[in-house]
Amino acid sequence: MRKLIIANWKMNGNISKIKHDLESYAQNPITNQDNIIFALPYVFLDNASQVQKIYGAQYKISSQDISQFDGFGAYTGEVSGTILSDLGVEYAIVGHSERRKIGETSDVLAKKLELAINNKITPIYCIGESYEDRVENNYLIKLEKELEILFELNQLVSNIIIAYEPIWAIGTGLTPSIAQIDEIMRLIKVTVKKNLPNAYVSTIYGGSVIADNTKDFLESSLVDGLLVGGASLKAEEFIKICSCGQSVMSTT
Ligand code: 13P
Protein backbone atom coordinates (compact mmCIF):
# COMPACT_ATOMS: atom_id res chain seq x y z
CA MET A 1 0.00 0.00 0.00
CA ARG A 2 1.26 3.47 -0.81
CA LYS A 3 1.48 5.72 2.23
CA LEU A 4 0.88 9.43 1.64
CA ILE A 5 3.32 11.97 3.03
CA ILE A 6 1.85 15.47 2.97
CA ALA A 7 3.98 18.49 3.88
CA ASN A 8 1.93 21.38 5.26
CA TRP A 9 4.25 24.38 5.19
CA LYS A 10 1.57 26.63 6.76
CA MET A 11 2.52 30.36 6.57
CA ASN A 12 6.21 29.73 5.86
CA GLY A 13 8.73 29.82 3.04
CA ASN A 14 9.94 32.29 0.47
CA ILE A 15 10.58 32.12 -3.26
CA SER A 16 14.19 31.04 -2.94
CA LYS A 17 13.35 28.24 -0.44
CA ILE A 18 10.50 27.00 -2.64
CA LYS A 19 12.75 26.93 -5.68
CA HIS A 20 15.71 25.39 -3.87
CA ASP A 21 13.79 22.73 -1.92
CA LEU A 22 11.38 21.69 -4.66
CA GLU A 23 14.16 21.50 -7.25
CA SER A 24 16.19 19.25 -5.00
CA TYR A 25 13.11 17.14 -4.08
CA ALA A 26 12.47 16.72 -7.82
CA GLN A 27 15.97 15.27 -8.27
CA ASN A 28 15.87 12.98 -5.24
CA PRO A 29 14.32 9.53 -5.83
CA ILE A 30 13.14 9.45 -2.19
CA THR A 31 11.02 12.59 -2.57
CA ASN A 32 10.24 12.53 -6.28
CA GLN A 33 7.24 10.26 -5.79
CA ASP A 34 3.55 10.70 -6.49
CA ASN A 35 2.57 9.87 -2.89
CA ILE A 36 4.37 13.00 -1.68
CA ILE A 37 2.35 16.21 -1.62
CA PHE A 38 3.43 19.77 -0.80
CA ALA A 39 0.75 22.08 0.65
CA LEU A 40 2.11 25.58 0.15
CA PRO A 41 0.94 29.16 0.67
CA TYR A 42 -1.17 30.40 -2.27
CA VAL A 43 1.52 32.83 -3.47
CA PHE A 44 4.04 30.04 -4.06
CA LEU A 45 1.76 27.62 -5.90
CA ASP A 46 2.66 28.94 -9.32
CA ASN A 47 6.41 28.76 -8.59
CA ALA A 48 5.97 25.20 -7.32
CA SER A 49 3.96 24.23 -10.34
CA GLN A 50 6.64 25.67 -12.67
CA VAL A 51 9.39 23.67 -10.91
CA GLN A 52 7.20 20.57 -11.06
CA LYS A 53 6.74 21.03 -14.83
CA ILE A 54 10.36 21.88 -15.66
CA TYR A 55 11.67 18.81 -13.80
CA GLY A 56 8.75 16.56 -14.73
CA ALA A 57 8.45 15.91 -10.99
CA GLN A 58 6.14 13.16 -9.72
CA TYR A 59 5.23 14.84 -6.43
CA LYS A 60 1.96 16.74 -6.16
CA ILE A 61 1.04 20.28 -5.24
CA SER A 62 -1.70 21.24 -2.77
CA SER A 63 -3.17 24.50 -1.54
CA GLN A 64 -3.80 24.98 2.18
CA ASP A 65 -7.34 26.22 1.59
CA ILE A 66 -9.83 26.93 -1.21
CA SER A 67 -12.50 29.56 -1.59
CA GLN A 68 -16.16 28.90 -0.80
CA PHE A 69 -16.91 30.84 -4.02
CA ASP A 70 -16.45 29.33 -7.45
CA GLY A 71 -15.14 30.61 -10.76
CA PHE A 72 -14.20 34.26 -10.98
CA GLY A 73 -15.76 37.37 -9.52
CA ALA A 74 -15.84 40.17 -6.99
CA TYR A 75 -14.48 38.26 -3.97
CA THR A 76 -11.45 40.22 -2.85
CA GLY A 77 -8.71 38.05 -1.36
CA GLU A 78 -10.33 34.75 -2.36
CA VAL A 79 -8.76 32.03 -4.55
CA SER A 80 -11.26 29.72 -6.24
CA GLY A 81 -10.97 26.08 -7.21
CA THR A 82 -11.11 27.21 -10.83
CA ILE A 83 -7.96 29.30 -10.36
CA LEU A 84 -6.19 26.59 -8.33
CA SER A 85 -6.95 23.99 -10.92
CA ASP A 86 -5.59 26.27 -13.64
CA LEU A 87 -2.31 26.47 -11.67
CA GLY A 88 -1.98 22.67 -11.67
CA VAL A 89 -3.00 22.23 -8.03
CA GLU A 90 -4.38 18.72 -7.48
CA TYR A 91 -5.14 18.76 -3.73
CA ALA A 92 -6.54 21.27 -1.22
CA ILE A 93 -6.53 21.16 2.57
CA VAL A 94 -10.03 21.90 3.86
CA GLY A 95 -11.00 22.53 7.48
CA HIS A 96 -7.59 22.62 9.16
CA SER A 97 -8.12 23.41 12.85
CA GLU A 98 -6.05 26.57 12.44
CA ARG A 99 -8.71 27.80 9.97
CA ARG A 100 -11.69 26.52 11.96
CA LYS A 101 -10.25 28.54 14.88
CA ILE A 102 -10.55 31.75 12.86
CA GLY A 103 -14.20 31.17 12.09
CA GLU A 104 -14.77 28.56 9.37
CA THR A 105 -18.19 27.03 9.94
CA SER A 106 -19.51 23.64 8.77
CA ASP A 107 -21.58 25.35 6.04
CA VAL A 108 -18.52 27.07 4.64
CA LEU A 109 -16.49 23.86 4.80
CA ALA A 110 -19.22 21.88 3.04
CA LYS A 111 -19.16 24.43 0.22
CA LYS A 112 -15.35 24.27 0.00
CA LEU A 113 -15.41 20.48 -0.22
CA GLU A 114 -18.02 20.60 -2.96
CA LEU A 115 -16.09 23.17 -5.00
CA ALA A 116 -12.79 21.31 -4.62
CA ILE A 117 -14.42 18.16 -5.96
CA ASN A 118 -16.20 20.03 -8.77
CA ASN A 119 -12.81 21.37 -9.85
CA LYS A 120 -11.18 17.92 -9.75
CA ILE A 121 -9.12 18.83 -6.70
CA THR A 122 -8.86 16.08 -4.08
CA PRO A 123 -9.77 17.45 -0.64
CA ILE A 124 -7.57 16.75 2.37
CA TYR A 125 -10.30 17.19 4.96
CA CYS A 126 -9.05 17.73 8.52
CA ILE A 127 -10.84 16.75 11.70
CA GLY A 128 -9.60 16.79 15.28
CA GLU A 129 -10.71 17.18 18.87
CA SER A 130 -9.51 19.65 21.50
CA TYR A 131 -7.72 18.58 24.66
CA GLU A 132 -10.96 19.20 26.64
CA ASP A 133 -12.97 16.98 24.28
CA ARG A 134 -10.41 14.23 24.77
CA VAL A 135 -10.26 14.37 28.59
CA GLU A 136 -14.03 14.80 28.95
CA ASN A 137 -14.53 11.82 26.65
CA ASN A 138 -16.50 13.85 24.09
CA TYR A 139 -14.02 13.30 21.29
CA LEU A 140 -15.97 10.68 19.33
CA ILE A 141 -19.10 12.85 19.19
CA LYS A 142 -17.00 15.83 18.12
CA LEU A 143 -15.26 13.89 15.34
CA GLU A 144 -18.47 12.25 14.09
CA LYS A 145 -20.01 15.71 13.83
CA GLU A 146 -17.07 16.97 11.77
CA LEU A 147 -17.43 13.96 9.46
CA GLU A 148 -21.16 14.56 8.95
CA ILE A 149 -20.72 17.36 6.43
CA LEU A 150 -19.15 14.88 4.04
CA PHE A 151 -22.34 12.89 3.73
CA GLU A 152 -24.20 15.66 1.92
CA LEU A 153 -21.65 15.26 -0.86
CA ASN A 154 -22.80 11.72 -1.49
CA GLN A 155 -22.75 11.45 -5.28
CA LEU A 156 -19.86 13.83 -5.78
CA VAL A 157 -16.98 12.29 -3.86
CA SER A 158 -14.87 9.69 -5.57
CA ASN A 159 -11.56 10.32 -3.84
CA ILE A 160 -10.92 12.00 -0.50
CA ILE A 161 -8.18 12.13 2.12
CA ILE A 162 -9.29 12.53 5.72
CA ALA A 163 -6.67 13.72 8.18
CA TYR A 164 -7.09 13.11 11.90
CA GLU A 165 -5.24 15.94 13.59
CA PRO A 166 -5.96 16.18 17.32
CA ILE A 167 -5.66 19.89 18.14
CA TRP A 168 -3.69 19.10 21.29
CA ALA A 169 -1.02 17.29 19.24
CA ILE A 170 -0.38 20.09 16.72
CA GLY A 171 2.96 21.80 17.32
CA THR A 172 3.11 20.55 20.92
CA GLY A 173 5.39 17.52 20.70
CA LEU A 174 2.52 15.45 22.16
CA THR A 175 1.15 12.53 20.15
CA PRO A 176 -1.69 10.06 20.70
CA SER A 177 -0.84 6.39 21.17
CA ILE A 178 -1.13 4.12 18.15
CA ALA A 179 -4.22 2.56 19.76
CA GLN A 180 -5.83 6.02 20.05
CA ILE A 181 -4.99 6.81 16.41
CA ASP A 182 -6.26 3.42 15.22
CA GLU A 183 -9.57 3.99 17.02
CA ILE A 184 -10.14 7.16 14.99
CA MET A 185 -8.86 5.71 11.70
CA ARG A 186 -11.37 2.88 12.17
CA LEU A 187 -14.17 5.32 13.03
CA ILE A 188 -13.47 7.31 9.86
CA LYS A 189 -13.23 4.26 7.60
CA VAL A 190 -16.42 2.66 8.96
CA THR A 191 -18.47 5.89 9.01
CA VAL A 192 -17.39 7.00 5.56
CA LYS A 193 -17.84 3.57 4.01
CA LYS A 194 -21.41 3.47 5.33
CA ASN A 195 -22.30 6.94 4.10
CA LEU A 196 -20.18 7.29 0.97
CA PRO A 197 -19.99 3.73 -0.34
CA ASN A 198 -18.50 4.74 -3.68
CA ALA A 199 -15.71 6.96 -2.37
CA TYR A 200 -12.07 5.94 -2.15
CA VAL A 201 -10.98 7.20 1.27
CA SER A 202 -7.46 7.50 2.66
CA THR A 203 -7.14 8.09 6.40
CA ILE A 204 -4.02 9.89 7.56
CA TYR A 205 -2.62 11.18 10.86
CA GLY A 206 -1.12 14.61 11.66
CA GLY A 207 0.25 16.27 14.81
CA SER A 208 3.90 16.48 15.94
CA VAL A 209 5.11 14.01 13.31
CA ILE A 210 8.93 13.91 13.18
CA ALA A 211 11.42 11.51 11.59
CA ASP A 212 11.80 9.62 14.87
CA ASN A 213 8.10 8.73 15.26
CA THR A 214 7.19 8.29 11.57
CA LYS A 215 7.78 4.53 11.48
CA ASP A 216 5.55 3.90 14.52
CA PHE A 217 2.61 5.70 12.87
CA LEU A 218 3.09 4.23 9.42
CA GLU A 219 3.36 0.68 10.65
CA SER A 220 -0.33 0.75 11.53
CA SER A 221 -2.22 -0.77 8.62
CA LEU A 222 -5.07 1.72 9.29
CA VAL A 223 -2.81 4.76 8.82
CA ASP A 224 -2.62 5.51 5.10
CA GLY A 225 -0.22 8.41 5.50
CA LEU A 226 0.89 11.47 7.47
CA LEU A 227 0.26 15.21 7.44
CA VAL A 228 3.47 16.85 8.57
CA GLY A 229 3.72 20.47 9.78
CA GLY A 230 6.90 21.87 11.36
CA ALA A 231 9.13 18.92 10.43
CA SER A 232 8.28 19.33 6.73
CA LEU A 233 10.10 22.67 6.63
CA LYS A 234 13.48 21.12 7.43
CA ALA A 235 14.62 19.40 4.24
CA GLU A 236 16.86 16.84 5.93
CA GLU A 237 14.17 15.84 8.43
CA PHE A 238 11.50 15.69 5.73
CA ILE A 239 13.65 13.45 3.52
CA LYS A 240 14.05 11.07 6.49
CA ILE A 241 10.26 11.01 6.94
CA CYS A 242 9.74 10.26 3.22
CA SER A 243 12.44 7.62 3.27
CA CYS A 244 10.75 5.90 6.19
CA GLY A 245 7.46 6.18 4.30
CA GLN A 246 8.96 4.41 1.29
CA SER A 247 10.45 1.58 3.34
CA VAL A 248 7.26 0.93 5.32
CA MET A 249 5.36 1.03 2.05
CA SER A 250 7.52 -1.62 0.45
CA THR A 251 7.15 -4.06 3.36
CA THR A 252 3.34 -3.85 3.79
P1 13P B 1 2.95 19.88 13.38
O1 13P B 1 3.49 18.70 12.63
O2 13P B 1 3.85 21.06 13.38
O3 13P B 1 2.50 19.46 14.77
O4 13P B 1 1.64 20.36 12.60
C1 13P B 1 0.68 19.45 12.26
C2 13P B 1 -0.27 20.07 11.32
O5 13P B 1 -1.04 20.94 11.69
C3 13P B 1 -0.22 19.63 9.92
O6 13P B 1 -1.34 20.09 9.22
Image (tube, rainbow, N blue to C red):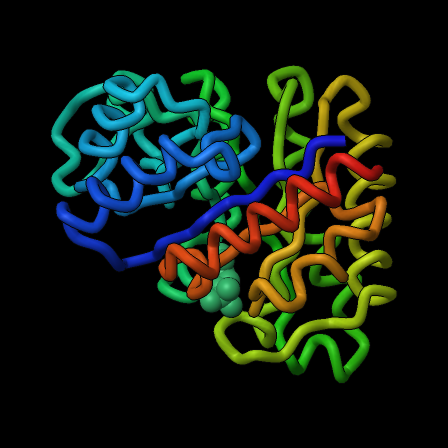
Please tell me how many numbered marks the rendered image carries.
Answer: 0
Side (left or right) of 193 relative to 108: right
Q: Quadrant of the N terminus?
A: top right
Who's the residue at 48% across and 74% down the image? 171
Q: Residue at x 40, y 41 (%)?
A: 38
Residue 9 in the image: state x and y as whole percent. Answer: 36, 54
Residue placed most toward the observer, 123 or 172: 172
* Foreground pick, 176 / 117: 176
Residue 24 in picture, x, y percent from top left: 32, 39
Q: Is residue 249 above or below residue 49?
A: below
Write the residue at 19% across / 33% down: 47
Residue at horizontal 28 percent and vertical 18 percent from the top: 53
- Residue 125 pos. (x, y %): 56, 43
Q: Is residue 195 left or right of residue 19?
A: right
Pick the quarter of the image with the C terminus. Answer: top right
Q: Is residue 63 visible?
A: yes
Q: Is residue 38 left or right of residue 227?
A: left
Q: Which quadrant of the figure has residue 75? A: top left
Q: Give coordinates of residue 153: x percent, y percent.
A: 62, 26
Asked if residue 244 is positioned above or below residue 80 in the image, the reply reads: below
Question: Is residue 226 toward the left or the right of residue 71 in the image?
Answer: right
From this viewpoint, is residue 112 visible? no
